[in-house]
Image: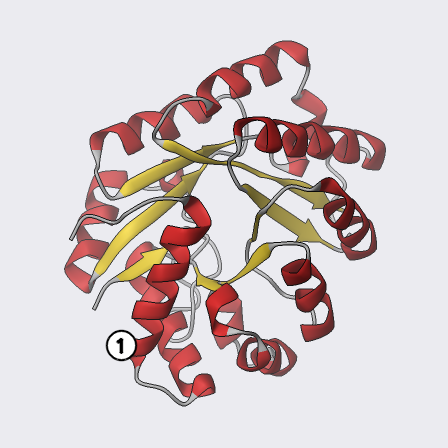
Amino acid sequence: MIFTDSHCHLTMSDAESTLARARDAGVRGFVFPGTKLSDAPETVAVAQKHADVWAAVGFHPHEAKDCDDAAFAEIERLAADPRVVAVGECGLDYHYMHSPRETQIAVFERHLDLAKRIDKPIIVHNRESTDDMVAILSASGARGILHSFTESEEVARKFIEAGYFISFSGIVTFRSADSLRACAKALPHDRVLIETDTPFLAPVPFRGRDNEPAYVIKVAELLATLWGVPVEDVAARTTANFERAFGVTLPR
């Protein structure tokens, strides 16, 4: 079985030991997104060292206030690297509002334009901003991934119709996540990805610990229960989706 982790922040852990534990657990594909200019070069450098790791570069909405022309020009330069397979993590976050709403939207739209110009997917962060997000993505013509999805089936289907994959994190295993599990059960299997959001959102039974890519298997096991299929089928389906979403081929 081969599992994949479509979203893990390796700059926030010891990347080498974290990757080694994940590979021992059967995880063979990783996308490592940056969140700001200062960590973007490291994401690319780690991906360049490992055949099964790819990078994404961009500004998280919390950091959008720091995305001036010079900073974005550097993101655009790094995005051209062949080991960079996506633009992001970027998007909208109206919960904390660390950057003004208008700034978040303008910076997000700049990332969408870049993704279209270089023909790479975009990794989208959406928190308490769904109305704006649906409107922006439906009109954008970009493609990509809604990371750590927490919305309803109805919202998920709108994003799928706009050309997006839906990625589930450890949140789907939480006791309080019945509505999210109903969504994950109902969606077409060929549009679903799994992720950790390392070091955040550790799944049951690891809540309270730092999350890591080895734990993505718990998300796959939960999907297997929901879909009524062996976990091997979930591994094969989400691995194929990973390769299609990011335009990569995993080493085997």
Which quarter of the image is occupied by the N terminus?
bottom left
Residue at (53, 27) in percent of width and height = 118
Q: Which residue is mark 1?
A: 232
Q: Kindly tell me whether residue 6 is visible in this rendering.
A: no
Residue at (26, 28) in percent of width and height = 48
Instruction: Please say if 232 is above or below 215.
Output: below
Pinpoint residue 108: horizontal percent, then vertical percent: 70, 34
Residue at (67, 21) in percent of width and height = 66
The reply, left or right, for residue 21 in relation to residue 70 is left
Residue 232 appears in which quarter of the rendering? bottom left
Mark 1: give few (<14), some (14-19) or many (20+) Cα within 10 Å. Answer: some
Residue at (39, 55) in percent of width and height = 242
Residue 184 appears in which quarter of the rendering? bottom right
Q: Give, as a three-letter code, the residue at label 1.
A: Glu
Please, what secondary structure does the residue beneath circle 1 have?
helix
Asked which colour scheme the image uses, the reply is: secondary structure
Pinpoint residue 151: horizontal percent, then vertical percent: 68, 67
Instruction: Please say if 136 is above or below 164.
Output: above
